[in-house]
């Protein structure tokens, strides 16, 4: 949890400098629920969050978005797909990669669900200490 808080506070981990509410998801760098929790933190600060990925990371982005939607934290606002040219040094020519951008907005129940989750966490921590 501290790692997530640090990432949000520094706004440098996987965040595009043009859009502060964008999370660029990697296929291999972080576990799935890192991105789920990071998106929740972003939605606490902003009204919406944009999840972005290339290639193999697209499945991760879709899974993160579905987890947030199915648990009632977010609603789908926009989905955009495209292809981008990535320079491949080994081949010496550009390679096209699929890209997806999913914009999620806070659900009406977001604040209520986050408060409930925090209460559960505090209760669990109190139980561990006793």
Image: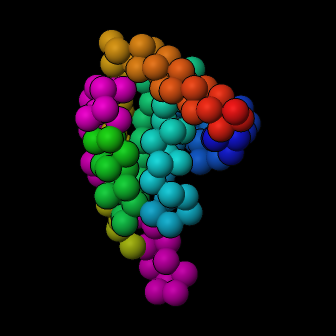
Name of the residue lying farthest toward the bottom: 90
| Residue 31 is at least partly visible in this image | yes
At which x and y percent is residue 15? 59, 42
The furthest residue to the front: 130
Of residues 3 and 20, the one drawn nearer to the viewer in this rendering: 3
Q: For the image shown, how many numbered marks are present on the structure?
A: 0
How did the renderer colour the structure?
A: rainbow
- In the figure, 89 relative to 7: above or below? below
Residue 68 picture quarter:
top left
Q: Is residue 108 above or below residue 37?
A: above
Can you say which quadrant of the picture contains the N terminus?
Answer: top right
At horizontal 58% and vertical 41% (from top left) the residue drawn is 16
Q: Is residue 113 above or below residue 91?
A: above
The residue sitting at 42% across, 13% down in the picture is 112
Image quarter (top left, top right, bottom left or bottom right) of the C terminus: top right
Residue 17 percent across, percent down from the top left: 63, 38
The question of residue 99 being in magenta is answered with: no
**Residue shown at the point (45%, 14%) measured from the top left:** 111
Q: Nearer the viewer, residue 118 or 27?
A: 118
The relative height of residue 63 versus residue 111 in the rendered view (above or below) is below
User: Would residue 24 be visible to someone looking at this image?
Assistant: no
Among the 4 quarters of the image, the one containing residue 108: top left
Main SS, magenta residues = strand
Residue 98, x across and y down, in percent: 32, 60
Magenta span of residues: 68-94
In percent of width and height, residue 71 lies at 31, 32
């Amino acid at each position: 949890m501290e790692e997530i808080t640090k990432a949000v506070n520094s706004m440098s981990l996987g965040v595009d400098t043009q859009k502060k509410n964008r999370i660029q998801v990697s296929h291999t760098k972080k576990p799935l629920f890192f991105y789920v929790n990071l998106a929740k933190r972003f939605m606490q600060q902003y009204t919406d969050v944009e999840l972005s990925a290339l290639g193999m990371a697209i499945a991760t982005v879709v899974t993160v978005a579905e987890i947030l939607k199915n648990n009632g934290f977010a609603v789908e606002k926009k989905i955009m797909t495209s292809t981008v040219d990535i320079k491949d040094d080994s081949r010496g020519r550009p390679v096209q990669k699929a890209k997806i951008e999913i914009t999620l907005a806070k659900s009406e129940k977001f604040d209520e669900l986050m408060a409930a989750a925090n209460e559960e966490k505090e209760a669990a921590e109190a139980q561990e200490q006793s």
